[in-house]
Each structure stands twice: as C-alpha cells, then as structure tokens.
Amino acid sequence: MLLERKSVFKELTNKSLLTVYFASFLIFMQLLISLTLYPLYIKYRGGSDFMIGLQSSIFTLFSVVFRLYFGPMADTLGRRSPLLIGSFVFGTAPILVWLSQDFFWMSLARIYQAIGMATFLSAASSTVADMVSVKIRGAAIGLYRSVASLSVLIGPAIGLWLINSYGYSYFFIFVSGISIIAMFLLSIVSLPEKGKDEDRIKVKLKDLISLLRDINLRASYTGIILTSIASGIILSYTAVYFLTLENIIPTSLFFLIYALSGIISSTFSGYLSDKIGRMKVVIPSMLLFSGGIILLGIPGLLGRWTLIISAILFGMGYPSCISVLTSWVVDSAPDRLRASALSFQESSIDMGNTIGILFFGILASGFYYRPLFIGLGFITFTYPLILKMVRR
C-alpha cells in the first residue's frame, strides 16, 4: 500500500505534469477573471444587466460554435498545437476588450476570445489524462479542477486590487501577461507523444455522433450542462448582486471561500471516485451545490453566515461535480476520440453558461435576484431524477 501511494505521488508530481498544471492555472485565472470581473468593466462602461448577460453569452456561445472545428484538433494534430493557440488568444483578447471603442467592438473581441476557450480547455484536460495511468485518472483530473479553484482564489482578488488601486489599464495588462507566460511554458514542456504523423487520425462526423449515443457520455454531459447553467450565473452575477445587498461579505471573500472549498473537495473527490465509483460521489456533490445556490437567494437567513455557508457549499459541490463528471467522460470515451469527447464536455460547460447567463440576464431585468437564485437551486436539485431519465 505504501509503495502504491509513493508511485501515485511520483506520477502526480512529475515535472511535466506540474508544468501543465501551472500553465493551466494561469489560463484558468485569466478565464475566471473575465467571467467574474468583466461584468464590472461593462458596468463601468455604462452597460446594463442585459448587456452583461449578452457579452458573456456571446463569449460562451461562440466557444461552442468554434469547438465544432477546433475541438477535435487535439486528436488530429496532437495536444501542443491547440494549447499554444488557445494561450495565445487568451493572451491577446484582453487587450482587444480594453481597447474596444464600444460594445460592438467589445463583442468582436469576446468572439475572438472564444477561440481560446474552444482550443485550450479540452486539450488541457486530455493532456492531463494522457500523462497518468488509468487507475489515477480521477485523481489527476481532480487536481486539474483544483487548479481551476485555486485560480478563483487568487484571480478575482488580484483583479479587484488592480482595478481599485491602478485602474483597468493595469488590470487588462496583467490578465494578458499571465496568458503569455502560460504560452511560453507550454512551448517548452515535454508532452506525451500523441499526434505524430503515424498516430494522427481523421475525426469524422460519425465518430462524433457515436460519442453522443453512449448513455454514460450523455449522462455526464447532461450533468455538466446543468451545473454549468448555475455556475455561469453565479460567477457572472454575484459581484453585481452583492452591490444590491447591505452588510454582506465582500465579493472577494465569497470567491476566496469558494476557491478554498473547491481546492479541497476536487482534490479528494477525484481520488474518491476512483475508489468507490463516479456516481457515488457526483450525486452528493450536486446536492451540496444546490444547497449553496438556494442559500445565496436568502442572505437574511443567518446574516453574513448564510453567504459564507453558501460559498462553502458551492465551492464543495461545483468543482467536485465537474471533476468527477469529466473523469466519467474520460472513462467512457474511446482513447482515439478522447480529446473530441472532452471537447463535447467543454462545449457542455459553454452551452450551460450561455443558457444560464443569457436567460438570467433577461429575467434579472424584470425580477429580483433572490427568487431567481432560489429557483435555480431547486432546478439543480433534480439532477438525480434527470440522470435516471437520460440513462434509460
């Protein structure tokens, strides 16, 4: 048992894998900053709640569209190319957003940013899966999602500090710079020998359709869409929502608690799902996630403690759900179509974000935030029932 643990630790602390984790952390930090703090910039530029939803939806919607072309790239050309393309786009898009003269040009910049989303994320998760043995994939992907939670811990806090201390110019330069650093690291790191000329495949439409016919993949994608609808709303609207409340915790503290909870939960949930099974972990995680959302809609229940508990439950639930469901995708997909299956997984996240952000923005224009959050929490609570229907 001790030798097995040492072997697992050695795999997970491989220098190349740690480099991929760190580069992904920088990209995730840029991405989470854009999701959580760009709404404040849109407000600063005179935009409405509807414009916040529209801008975020444009980004996520075009991520889905572009991924139809770019998603299989990691299977056909290897992992490095989409990683470098994605990090380059993430490094240049913030400058274009910053220099946009109006919301039309900002929309074009967000469409360009969507190329980064379409190329990087599925390639990164498939790269992580390639770099470890089958028996610890859940643990490796759980750590990968912990990296995403760590980016929430650090990114919004740094972003808010830069905005409040130096203004948006330094903020956008910082966001751009960290992605360029990630691109440099990924250009020199040693990656698995995938995508060589003799190994490259031609991904056909029938291959992609075959993925959607798999009941386990459908169940995974459905859960990812549902959680992403809710998480996209919370990440995009929490900062603006907190402006409407009195005597609440700072936005940065909410995301700090969320991130710390997410780092812990996703680290252990992936490992636990390797041992006892994916569904035995994802269902409780989804219920915790639902409880956190409902509490977000009733901030007066226990005062500030309500929002603190909400952040804990949200942080424990969402990263665990995504890491375990992603591991389930990797388990269910053929090796030769792994990146394509994971591109569907990332598209499921984007589709959920697009649906949630757009419709919440429309509803928030005519209703209060609180009942919308409560209703959203009860919808996510129904996932076990939805799961049974999808797997029939």
Image (tube, rainbow, N blue to C red):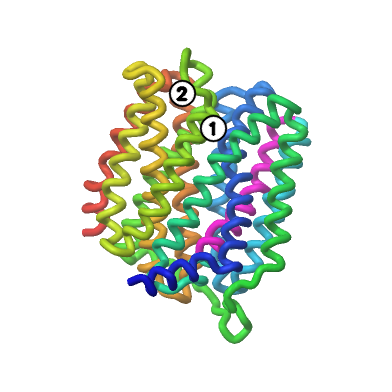
Q: Do the residues labelled 2 and 1 touch (CB within 8 Å)?
A: yes
Q: How far apart are marks 2 and 1 (CA)?
A: 10 Å
Looking at the figure, which quarter contains the C terminus? bottom left
Q: Which amino acid does label 1 sit on?
A: Gly
Crowd rating for badge 2 (residues with CA inside 10 Å; few <14, some 14–19, many 20+):
some
Which residue is label 1 attached to?
53
- Res. 210 visible in picture: no
SS for dot 1 = helix
The x and y percentages for residue 386 are 26, 48
User: Which disc number belongs to residue 269?
Assistant: none
**Residue under the point 67% across and 21% down:** 46
334, above or below 141, in the image: below
Which quadrant of the figure has residue 310? top left
Is 87 on the left or on the right of 358, as rendered?
Answer: right
Q: Which element is circle 2 on?
A: helix
Q: Specify the quadrant of the image occupied by residue 152.
A: top right
Sequence-wise, which precedes: disc 2 or disc 1? 1
Determine crowd level at label 1: few under 14, some 14-19, many 20+ residues with C-alpha closer than 10 A. many
Residue 115 on the magenta segment: yes
The residue where tag 2 is placed is: 364
Q: Which residue is drawn at 51% across and 35% down?
A: 256
Q: Nearer the viewer, residue 20 or 48?
A: 20
- Along the line of sight, which residue is nearer the eye, 172 or 263? 263
* Residue that extends furthest to the top in the rendered view of this protein: 246
Per the rendered image, the range of residues in magenta is 102-125
